[in-house]
Amino acid sequence: MSEERSERAKDNGGPKSGAMISRIAAMQDYDRYRDLAWEGSFEDYLNIVRERPQVTRNAFQRVCDMVISYGTEEYIDNKKKLIRYNFFRDEIDEGKDAIFGLDIPLMRMMNVLKAAAEGYGPERRVILLHGPVGSSKSTIARLLKKGLERYCASPEGALYTFRWVNLGETGLASSEADVFDSPMHEDPLRLIPQEWRERATEKLGLSNDKFRVVVEGDLDPASRFIFNGLLQRYKGDWGSAMKNHIVIKRLILSEKDRIGIGTFQPKDEKNQDSTELTGDINYRKIAEYGSDSDPRAFNFDGEFNIANRGIVEFVEVLKLDVAFLYDLLGASQEHRIKPKKFAQTDIDEVIIGHTNEAEYKRLLNNEFMEALRDRTIKIDVPYITRLSDEVRIYEKDFNNEKVRGKHIAPHTL
């Protein structure tokens, strides 16, 4: 019987199934995998920055460049010159989340992003998409997050972070750990002390005519703890600490893996607190480190923490409890958050929220929310009123590919 089964398996592709795996494996792009998994020394990273200073862009600059990289079209409508951004056609997913008829609101949003990328003020505000239910507010946010994932995996959108290595003998990570990843995926140039940065970028020639390298902010509490411990170990020799304990790696943003892209939505107030935004203490590690104020005993896994270097979306942002709004004020205006029992921590991310008319009216009528009103830039996202655009939406959702085996009568859409 076993011989019969083996013969039957051969006929049905049993032992030959390895050929199927090989055919699937042949689809893999090894060169791309090597690029995305790149690792090198701090010296290697400085050479990359010298060649392509754009890898040090802040979050607003990266999102703005990502949208523009897909190209634009100019056209005249009612004697007005409008710009259509091809990115919002959703070529990434073959038009699955394509947006029609909202070129003017999207132009306003891009003007905000461009001004923020230049540092003219909007980078210190929450971008608030405001409009009725079903007007594509969530789709716009989803497109930006999805596009950023794809962009950072391309050569043009590459960005980098670091990890601490060879820490076993120092005891700075833990009693057993030899490696410690930057918990907030920070730019490696933050490893250069602030008082040296401007001179270092000039002396090394990191900037060029097209892009000026600007390094803002300080390391997160955990990385700063290790940094100071290594300086003490090497008696202030910063160069030895960097050569022996720093590895630079390519950073790939991913919403599913909670790296650089975050999403926060209101829930039951009894089951939610502000630590969901700024991280919480890891009580299991307190026994090892002996204090709940040791940064190594803290999980930097709040939405603001994990969205550093990327974008964070607030679903129905005005339904948040007041405690969350306080964190939102500091995060937008100062680019800083206050984790429990630690000093203010620098962040670099685009904060985008959306809300409906009823919630926004409540904000306007609440005199205690004046600070939040001042820290938002409202972009109205209305319903489309042009028949041809409405038909295009229905054609996207009710075409022959989506509705199989059914006849759609002429002029139905």
Image: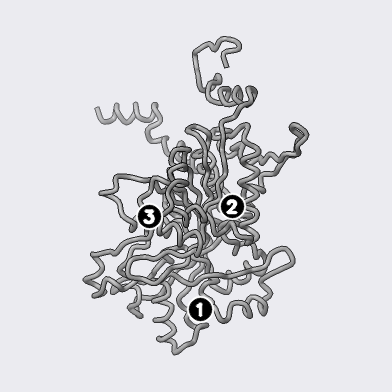
Question: Which residue is drawn at the image coordinates 35% and 56% (left, top)?
Answer: 323
Kindly report the distance in space between the C-alpha atoms of the residues bearing marks 3 and 1: 41 Å
Q: Nearer the viewer, mark 3 or mark 2?
A: 3
Mark closer to the chain start, 3 or 1: 1
Question: Which residue is drawn at the image coordinates 43% and 71% (left, top)?
Answer: 164
Find disc 1 in the rendering and name its residue.
Answer: 243
Q: Nearer the viewer, mark 3 or mark 1?
A: 3
Disc 1 marks a residue whose amino acid type is Lys
- The tag on residue 324 is 3
The quadrant of the rendering that contains the C terminus is top right
Question: Which image quarter: residue 396?
Answer: top right
On the image, the x and y values in percent for residue 315 come to 43, 44
Find disc 2 in the rendering and name its residue.
Answer: 63
Disc 3 marks a residue whose amino acid type is Phe
Is 155 located above or below residue 266 in the figure? below
Numbered disc 1: secondary structure:
helix
Q: Is residue 400 left or right of residue 234?
A: right
Q: Nearer the viewer, mark 2 or mark 1?
A: 2
Foreground residue, 235 or 68?
Answer: 68
On the image, the x and y values in percent for residue 174 come to 31, 73
On the image, the x and y values in percent for residue 349 come to 51, 57
Kindly report the distance in space between the C-alpha atoms of the residues bearing marks 2 and 1: 32 Å
On the image, the x and y values in percent for residue 250 come to 52, 60
The quadrant of the rendering that contains the N terminus is top left
Question: Which image quarter: residue 54?
Answer: bottom right
Foreground residue, 231 or 168?
Answer: 231
Numbered disc 2: secondary structure:
helix
Mark 3 vs 1: CB contact within 8 A: no
